[in-house]
Amino acid sequence: MLEKSKPVKKVSKNISVAIVVARFNETITNGLLLGAKKALKQAGVLDKNITLVFVPGSVEIPLAAKLLAERKTIDCVVCLGAVIKGETNHDVYVARIAADGIRQVMLETKKPIAFGILTCNTKAQAVARSANDQHNRGYEATKAALEMIAVVRKI
């Protein structure tokens, strides 16, 4: 049996979080966004300190994440998308571009950039990972980003 996810620890109300959401596979990414917002609410992040940006797809996420992370007022960026296997290998390239770009942004800006992009073989897998439950990857990615803010500040 899988362990139930622990609630997010409270953070400073002054934490500022940006969320970049791909519109492609919108029903899935909307579920991820709901999970991210739930984690932020549990952590006590104020609505006025959340910047929400929508982009066409997962390939476009790194550019938006970089522009947001370069703002001095943003403490972390949560990247949400869904890449689902199709009839060709297109998903492999999309996922690689998104992952490499997000990693680059994180290392260049030295800010937490959470990878909340699903890379699933089927739509059913994506639905399961974006559902309103303890397995929502948007929730988990946001928890990781908030935790990393504290880690980065300690280092």
Image: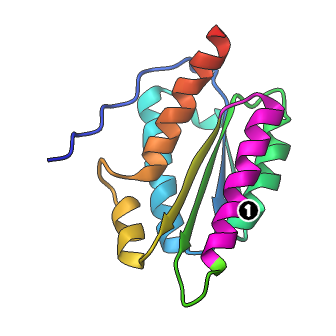
Instruction: Give the residue at x 57% y 21%.
Output: 13
In the image, is 66 to the left or to the right of 37?
Answer: right
Q: Vertical placement of 62 versus 50: above or below?
A: below
Q: Is residue 40 visible?
A: no
Q: Residue furthest left?
A: 1
- Image quadrant where residue 78 sits: top right
Instruction: Give the residue at x 38% y 60%.
Output: 129
Instruction: Give the residue at x 67% y 33%.
Output: 76
Give coordinates of residue 53: x percent, y percent. Answer: 71, 54
- Image quadrant where residue 145 sits: top right
Give coordinates of residue 92: x percent, y percent. Answer: 62, 71
Give coordinates of residue 24: x percent, y percent. Answer: 62, 74
In the image, is 4 to the left or to the right of 155?
Answer: left
In the image, is 97 to the left or to the right of 79?
Answer: right
Q: Which residue is nearer to you in this view: 74 or 1?
A: 1
Point out the stretch of residues depicted in magenta.
91-112
Labels in figure, total: 1
Q: Is residue 121 visible?
A: yes
Query: Residue beneath label 1, please?
Result: 97
Residue type for callout 1: Ile
Q: Vertical placement of 35 versus 8: above or below?
A: below
Q: Which residue is nearer to you in this view: 16 or 153?
A: 153
- Does residue 52 show up magenta in the picture? no
In the image, is 108 to the left or to the right of 117?
Answer: right
Q: Residue furthest top?
A: 154
Q: Vertical placement of 59 versus 9: above or below?
A: below
The secondary structure making up most of the magenta span is: helix
- Does residue 107 show up magenta in the picture? yes
Instruction: Give the residue at x 60% y 87%.
Output: 88
Give coordinates of residue 109: x percent, y percent. Answer: 81, 32
Q: Which residue is nearer to you in this view: 37 or 147?
A: 147
